[in-house]
Amino acid sequence: MFEVRCAGLYLTAVVVLAAGSASAAGIDLSKPYGNRSGCINKNGQKVYAEDMLLLTDTDFITATSACAFTGKHGEADGSLTVKAECEAEGEEGKSPATFTIKHSAKNAKKLVIADEDGSVYGEVSRCR
C-alpha cells in the first residue's frame, strides 16, 4: 500500500513539474502558427507566397528557408529562444540560427518571430 501511494505521489510531482516547465515558456507551439499562406501550407506546399511564415513545434518555414529546431529555452519574460539549423533556397548546407518568439504587444493571441539581430519576420496566428 505504501509503495502504491509513493508511486502516486511521485507521478503527481512529475506531472506538476512538467506542467510548470511548459507554462514557464509562456508559448504553446503544440499547434501550428502561421500567417494566411503559412496556415494554408501547414500540411504541405499548396500555394506559393512570398510572405509565407509557418511556425510549428519543430520548425520555422518561410518562402525561402526551412529551419529545424535543435533546442528551445523559455525565458523569464515569457518569450522562447530557439536554436535552429536552417537551409536557405539556392544555398548548400545548413547554417545555425537563433530566433526569439514572443507574444505580440498588439494582440496576445499572436506571436512575433525575430532573428538574433532583432529583425522581425512577422506576426503569426494559430492555424485552424
Image (cartoon, helix red, strand yellow):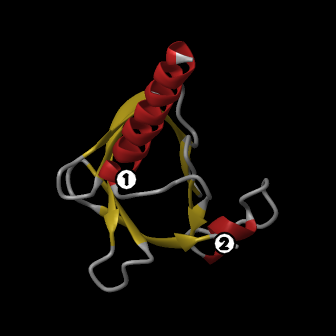
Under mark 1, the amino acid is Ser
User: x, y (%) of residue 31?
Assistant: 62, 58
Circle 2 sits in a helix, a strand or a loop, which is it? helix
Residue 78 in the image, given as x and y percentages of width and height: 26, 58
Please give the name of the residue rendered at 45% of the width and 25% of the height, measured from the top-left corner: 10
Which numbered tag is attached to residue 23?
1
Q: Nearer the viewer, residue 115 or 25?
A: 25
Which residue is located at x 57 percent, y 67 percent? 34
* Relative depth, front residue between 109 and 59: 109
Q: Earlier in the sequence, mark 1 or mark 2?
A: 1
* Image point (40%, 33%), residue name: 13
Q: Is residue 41 above or below residue 56?
A: below
Q: Please name which of the two marks, 1 or 2, marks the residue nearer to the observer.
A: 1
Q: How many marks?
A: 2
For label 2, count other residues whose C-alpha is less than 10 Å away and answer few (under 14), some (14-19) or many (20+).
Answer: many
Q: Is residue 127 visible?
A: yes
Q: Which percent across, then down, holds residue 30?
A: 58, 52
Relative to 33, say whether 16 is above or below: above
The correct choice, above or below, for 124 with respect to 80 in the image is: below
The kind of residue on which mark 2 rests is: Ser
Q: Which residue is mark 2?
A: 37
For image coordinates 77% across by 67% down, the residue present is 47
Q: Quadrant of residue 84?
A: top left
Q: Position of residue 117 (x, y in %)?
A: 20, 51
